[in-house]
Amino acid sequence: MNTLTDRVAKLARSVPLRHALVVPFILQISLAVALTGWLSIRNGQQAVNEVAVQLRHEITARIHQYLQTYVDTPHKINQLNANAIRLGEVNVQDLTALEQHLWYQLETFDTVTAVYIGSEYREHVAVERSESGRFQVKVSGEATQHDIRIYTAEQPGQRTKLLRSRPNYDPRTRPWYASAVKSGTATWGGIYRLFATPKYVLNASLPIYDDRRQLLGVAAVDFSLTGISQFLRSLSIGRSGETFILERRTGLLVGSSATQQPYVIQNPTAPLDQQNPVRVPAIASSDALTRRTAEYLRQRFGSLAEIAQAQQLDFDLAGERQFLQVVPLKTAQGLDWLIIVVVPERDFMDQINANTRNTIVLCLAAFGLATALGILTARWIAQPILQLGSAAKAIAAGNLDQTVSVSSTSELNGLAQSFNQMAQQLRESFSALARTNEELESRVAQRTTELGEKNLQLQQEIRDRQAAEAALKTSEAELRLMFAAMTDIVIVFDAEGRYLKYMQTQSFSYEPDVDRVGKTVYEVLPKIVADVITKAISQALHLRKKPGADDKRKNIFVEYHLAIEHQETWFLASVSPLSDHAVLWVARDISKLKKTEAALKQAKESADAASLAKSQFLSNMSHELRTPLNIILGFTQLLLRSQSLNPQQQDYLDTINRSGEDLLTLINDVLEMSKIEAGRVTLNETEFDLYGLLEFVYNKCLTSKHDRKNCNSFLSDRPTCRTTFAPMRVNCAKFSLI
């Protein structure tokens, strides 16, 4: 230990004062610059993550909303056509009128590609929009000998040119017709190739029945996949981000914002009706970002069909981070797609990296400037001290005629004056020189202590700030996990029942597409439920404003039910006042509890009915048994009064009488058991001969003279008999007046 101390002391003595002043100053500046740069980079990365999440949410929401509107239109058109045919407004066999009707519909709905109807009579009329925007008419039936003919037309019924034709066309064999007939309701026929054209379209079809449920035909609507791709390309997804839609079960592309089309023509130089279009799987896309994203999803989930809910992911592509969001889109008519948005991190990081470089350059410049100032300051402080040292060495060598002139700080000027006085009075006062040296050492130590204390304070402030930031991040993560794990609906209402804040889970939702914030409960929920909610809000606010109420929050509990997905769902809500004009509404699904209560009530009613039936049965049977038994006892008693019977006959009749009375008592005991089960047992207090009863039991049990002679001795377990007779004695005392 002493050796180490000596080495440190030796090293300290060898360090120049200039270095001792500059090095700690540079270390502090370096720490501050490094911490500033790290915080800048850290905050920039966090900002990138937040912006990426918001952008992905916004893009997927816009795509989801567009597709909902886009895919609802075809089914509405089919329903309008079906209604017109059922009402007799359109005749499926009048091809001219049917063509005019479909023409005007296609003019009205500019988002669809084709509108057509096929009948059970093998008639088929279609009006479609070509890529140039002009209308084409497809006709097939008896008038065309069941050839399908495609014409250009300027107006309904005014066909100008026959483009092409194909023989033996039967609409009933087409996929759109067969899928609609098979489902019996509105359905998506899937993405299929158009007849005699190299195009893939998405088909929506609806079977048409008359009042007797006889099939008249099928109404169908096509819309091109290029319309979806055009919309996706219109979205702004960073600088190089992409979005695409694919079928979840097959992985085939439906639309893409990249140059890759959902299908490619294998033989583009062939005639139009002989070209062969082939759909493109996402993992075989010519666009690298689309292909690598599909490969990553398949590798992570094993199959795209496993993606059942929205996912926010990120992965590396060529060493660069990619932000990824996947949202399923599934409709009741059979549509099952995945909406995928992928944005490279570099789209956000370019400006942040530039700012980071500027920050680093500025920090380095500040570091260099601070270092230069530290060196100049150290030199300014150390130079006078060096002059004093040289003069001191000269005095130590015997040259006492030394005068030091210093133009520096007041302390150094005072030191120089003291040094000059010391040189003049050296011989006369060595003690004054010693005190002056002690004073100088004390001042240096004080300066060093103050500098160390300030350094410690700065380090403590840095540690406190780091701890506060860590605690803030932990609290934020816990809060996010808490809301993600909640299964209850949490709402903040004002006094008028208006939504102020709204949070709900994915397990159950009533009208999830409605934006509730700012609306009243009467605009969102049925009137009956809205009345219950507003009444509970008023009660909760009234309890808060009630005179004498303390500051503790008081809850109001209320039950209500909603029809969610064609099922009645019950909720138990807790209403707590947050302020004089707002309440906190927390609702939980109690449908299972309600079903359990109903099942318990039904089980209790069944048990009561079974008990009543048993009691009625016992009552009826006891009555049926008592009637013949009383007759037997009556005749037995009459025979016992006869004087012509011998003693043996008298004994037999007496046995019959006693056995009948025992049977009657047994029936009464059965009735008594039913009373005990029903809780209506009563104690019938009557006086009787105890010894006579014991003698009767004795005579009934011991019928022979041999038994009576040996009745005083039994072969049994004596402790068990004592245990049995003791409760009998207690019961005799309990149920008698003795």
Image: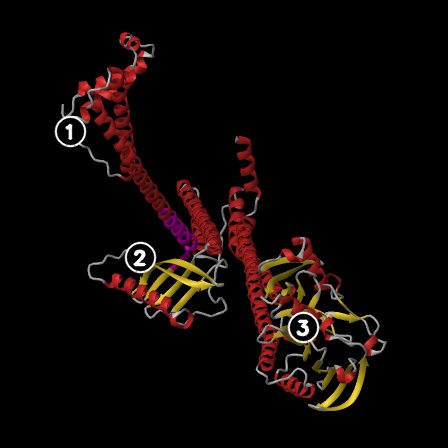
Residue 369 within the segment the image draws in magenta: no
Crowd tier of the residue under label 3, counting other residues whose Cα lies within 10 Å: few below 14, some 14–19, many 20 or above: many
**Between 23 and 390, which is closer to the camera in this rendering?**
23
- At mark 1, the secondary structure is loop
Disc 2 target residue = 555
What SS does tag 3 mark? strand
Q: Is residue 319 visible?
A: no
Q: For the residues marked 3 and 2, what is the alpha-carbon distance in whole angstroms?
A: 54 Å
Residue 515 appears at what percent x and percent y? 47, 70
677 above or below 452?
above
Residue range in magenta is 586-604
Q: Is residue 230 above or below residue 443?
A: below
Along the line of sight, which residue is nearer the eye, 30 or 677? 677
* Lower sequence index among marks 3 and 1: 3
Is residue 80 among what the camera can see?
A: yes
- Residue at 67% x, 53% y is 302
